[in-house]
Image: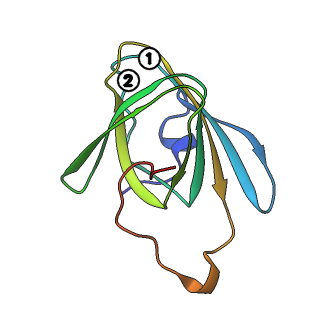
Amino acid sequence: MTGDPADTNPELYRVVFENERVRVLEYRDTPGDHTAPHRHPDTVMVTLSAFSRRISAGGREVGVELPAGAVRWVAAQEHSGENVGGTPSHAMFVELKEPRPGGAVAGTALGPGAP
């Protein structure tokens, strides 16, 4: 699997803020756009527009439908995605740089978790 989404898809992801504790990515795409395989650490995602995507990893796929203004936890994961909706997507990703407390291991969830 490849790495940083700002490197794998710089036309879709843009770093808008970074310090020693967090990195904030802005994501914009249009219907039919695909992301290359990439990884995210534990992240908080905020949708600024409706968000309709197919997330894929390891032979698994999940659909993600969220309204504008949704805030979701996204556990650390590697995946690729596709805008399967009829409108552009716009979201912010606040990536955490600090390790999980107590050395906890990321789960196997794919896509954002429940609110």
Q: Which residue is mark 1?
A: 30
Whole-percent x, y for residue 102 in the image: 61, 86
Q: Number of marks in the image?
A: 2
Observer-nearest of 82 and 110:
110
Outermost residue on the right side: it is: 19
Secondary element type, mark 1 = loop
Q: Which residue is situated farthest in the left direction here? A: 59
| Residue 94 image position (x, y, % from top left) | 66, 48
Q: Nearer the viewer, residue 11 or 27?
A: 27
- In space, the residues marked 1 and 2 are separated at their CA atoms by 6 Å
Of all residues, the one furthest to the bottom in this rendering is 102
Amino acid type of the residue tagged 2 in the rendering? Asp
Mark 1 vs 2: CB contact within 8 A: yes
Which residue type carries mark 1?
A: Thr
Residue 4 x, y percent position in the rendering = 53, 50
Residue 54 position (above or below residue 79): above
Where the N terminus falls, by quadrant? bottom left
Q: Residue at x 63, y 80 (%)?
A: 101
Q: Which residue is mark 2?
A: 33
- Label 2 sits on a secondary structure element that is loop
Q: Quadrant of residue 10?
A: top right
